[in-house]
Structure formats: C-alpha cells, structure tokens
Image (spheres, grey):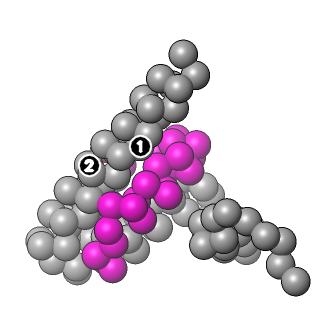
Amino acid sequence: MATASETPVLDTLAAMTVDSLERCGLVPETFMLTRIAALAASDAPPISYVAHIDPAIQAGLTAEQVQDVLVAIAPVVGTARVMTAAANIAKALGITIAVAETEAGGRA
C-alpha cells in the first residue's frame, strides 16, 4: 500500500521527474530546456511551467536561453503555440512570485 500523502498527484509527478532525470544522459541545463520545449509544443498550462521554475533556476537557465528555445521551436510548433507558451511562462512566474511573497509574509 502506498504511503498516504496530502499531495499524491504532485508527489507522483515529482517522482517521475526525478526518475526521468536519473535515466537521462543530458546535463541538467539541456534537460530543462528540452522539457520547456516539450511544454510549449504540448500547449501546457501555466501550472505545468510552475513545476519547472525551481529546477530551471537550479540548472542555471537564463531568460535568454528560454527565449532561444522558443525561437528555435517556433517553425516547428507554430507562432500561436510559442506565443501561448511565452504568456504561460509569464503567468507561471507571477504565480511563483505571489506564492513566495505570501510565504515570506507568513514568516514575518
């Protein structure tokens, strides 16, 4: 029987990500850029990007690198998907900042 958790879906996704990283030969930076490209190509919602912000920062990604990935995939996935991805990334950053500010305010 699985261990009870208040966030079983998030826990499962986190475990899948760790497993994927361990089985993949890509360096963390390339791994995260590839995942961002996949999110954009699949028209992922902002919450999907939220889950990748901290790992992307940990991998040392820059905003310029993310922009470069969106430019690189635009001819393949299309303008609409790339523009939606850019907007969803911005929303995800806003969500992340709002959560961090709320948590910081709760500790003060």
Front-lying residue, 37 or 39: 39
Q: Is residue 73 above or below residue 100?
A: below
Q: Which residues are magenta?
A: 41-65
Does residue 94 show up magenta in the picture? Answer: no
In this view, the residue farthest toward the right is 1
Name the residue: 47% across, 23% down.
Answer: 105
8 left or right of 85 in image: right
Does residue 62 show up magenta in the picture? Answer: yes
Front-lying residue, 91 or 26: 91
Q: Position of residue 106 (x, y in %)?
A: 53, 26
1 left or right of 40 in image: right
Query: Quarter holding the C terminus?
Result: top right
Name the residue: 32% across, 68% down.
Answer: 45
Name the residue: 43% across, 55% down.
Answer: 50
- Label 2 residue SS: helix
Query: From mark 1 to mark 2, how far is it between C-alphas?
Result: 10 Å
Task: Tell me whether circle 1 and circle 2 mark residues in contact (CB < 8 Å).
Answer: no
Front-lying residue, 87 or 25: 87
Q: Which residue is mark 1?
A: 96
- Label 1 residue SS: helix
Q: Which mark is residue 90?
A: 2
Query: Quarter holding the N terminus?
Result: bottom right
Q: Position of residue 66 (x, y in %)?
A: 34, 52
Identify the mark nearer the N-term, 1 or 2.
2
Q: Is residue 53 above or below residue 104?
A: below
Q: Is residue 62 visible?
A: no
66 left or right of 32 in image: left
